[in-house]
């Protein structure tokens, strides 16, 4: 899990490096076709990739995150922040544990497109948090999307409600380290097991996204649409099998694969179905498959 260890932070501060993946012990912590012979105008232009920057991402005390909205969210709705379940300030949720509507006053540093902090946002509750099947925490803020936009000119990131596609170009945007990793979706993992926790249908990066500690909770953004398709959460550091900081892949037949140095994220397309009018959580809504308490 991608939370920074104190020692790693000290080393990185001295070295001036970007960061390092680790789980803190405790809380917080296609080729072009030849042109037709007659008309160049008949050649379709490839879609231009959407510029991905830091706007709307946030820095937590020990993790990364982003201000998010869903396709049906309204500007007048209370804004939400997405991070990891293992970034919850009260500690890692236990296997099988689901937390909803828990009071919180956690603060978040809101970043602009250049990665500069322009405001401190504050939560009033943890709407949802779990490390079962997925690894997410969703906070509700004390301000609406409209208020944040009016004050700081920053809009939220939209969470896609469709499953990501293998081969897609993605960006992992860390507000904690103010660093953007670029790679592709390598594929999907039936079960990803780390220590006592198991996650379903996880997203595996190609090797270029060598995420590190402090990148936990970073939004994984589709480079062509600008939408959030997953949330960064872990990677295999030492080549160990299914241990903390060394997740393993388990297929439908129970076969285990270890990929040292490869990193992963948890998909987010299933989240929007669980939120109704006013950004209210409804785990009984049609199509909602998130674990229930």
Image (tube, helix red, strand yellow):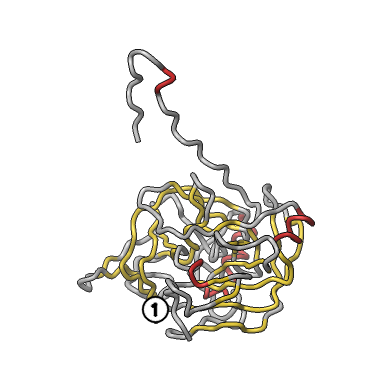
Residue found at the very far right of the displayed protein: 151
* Depth order, front residue of 25/280: 280
Q: Is residue 48 left or right of residue 67?
A: left
Q: Residue at horizontal 35%, vertical 70%?
A: 192
Secondary structure found at label 1: loop
In the picture shown, does residue 87 fall above or below 58? below
Q: Name the residue tied to disc 1.
A: 195
Count of numbered circles in the view: 1
Spot occupied by residue 132 in the image (x, y as percentages of width and height): 43, 78
In the picture shown, does residue 224 fall above or below 135? above
Residue found at the very far left of the displayed protein: 253
In the picture shown, does residue 167 fall above or below 108? above
Q: Is residue 252 left or right of residue 121?
A: left
Spot occupied by residue 68 in the image (x, y as percentages of width and height): 60, 62
Local crowd size for mark 1, using a 10 Å CA cut-off: few (<14), some (14–19), many (≥20): few
Locate residue 256: give its quadrant: bottom left
Locate residue 287: give its quadrant: bottom left
Spot occupied by residue 140 in the image (x, y as percentages of width and height): 65, 73
Locate residue 39: give its quadrant: top left
Spot occupied by residue 215 in the image (x, y as percentages of width and height): 55, 62
Q: Residue at horizontal 68%, vertical 60%?
A: 75
Q: Residue at horizontal 53%, vertical 79%?
A: 25
């Amino acid at each position: 899990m991608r939370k920074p260890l104190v020692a790693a932070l000290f080393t990185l501060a001295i070295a001036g490096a970007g960061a390092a993946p680790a789980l803190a012990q405790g809380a917080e912590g296609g080729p072009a076709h030849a042109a037709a012979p007659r008309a160049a105008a008949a050649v379709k232009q490839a879609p231009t990739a959407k510029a991905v920057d830091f706007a709307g991402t946030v820095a937590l005390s020990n993790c990364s995150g982003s201000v998010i909205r869903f396709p049906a969210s309204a500007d007048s709705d209370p804004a939400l922040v997405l991070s990891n379940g293992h970034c919850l300030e009260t500690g890692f949720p236990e296997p099988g544990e689901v937390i909803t509507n828990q009071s919180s006053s956690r603060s978040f540093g809101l970043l602009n497109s250049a990665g500069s902090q322009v405001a401190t946002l504050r939560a009033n509750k943890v709407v949802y948090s779990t490390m079962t099947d997925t690894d997410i925490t969703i906070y509700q803020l004390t301000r609406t999307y409209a208020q944040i936009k009016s004050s700081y000119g920053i809009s939220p990131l939209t969470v896609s409600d469709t499953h990501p596609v293998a081969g897609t170009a993605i960006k992992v945007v860390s507000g904690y380290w103010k660093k953007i990793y670029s790679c592709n979706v390598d594929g999907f993992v039936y079960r990803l097991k780390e220590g006592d926790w198991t996650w379903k249908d996880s997203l595996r990066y190609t090797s270029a996204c060598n995420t590190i500690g402090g990148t936990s909770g970073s939004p994984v953004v589709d480079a062509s649409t600008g939408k959030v398709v997953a949330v960064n959460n872990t990677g295999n550091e030492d080549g160990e099998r299914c241990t903390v900081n060394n997740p393993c892949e388990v297929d439908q037949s129970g076969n285990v694969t270890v990929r040292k140095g490869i990193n992963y994220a948890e998909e987010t397309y299933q989240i929007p179905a669980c939120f109704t009018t006013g950004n209210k959580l409804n785990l009984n809504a049609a199509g909602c498959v998130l674990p229930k308490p």
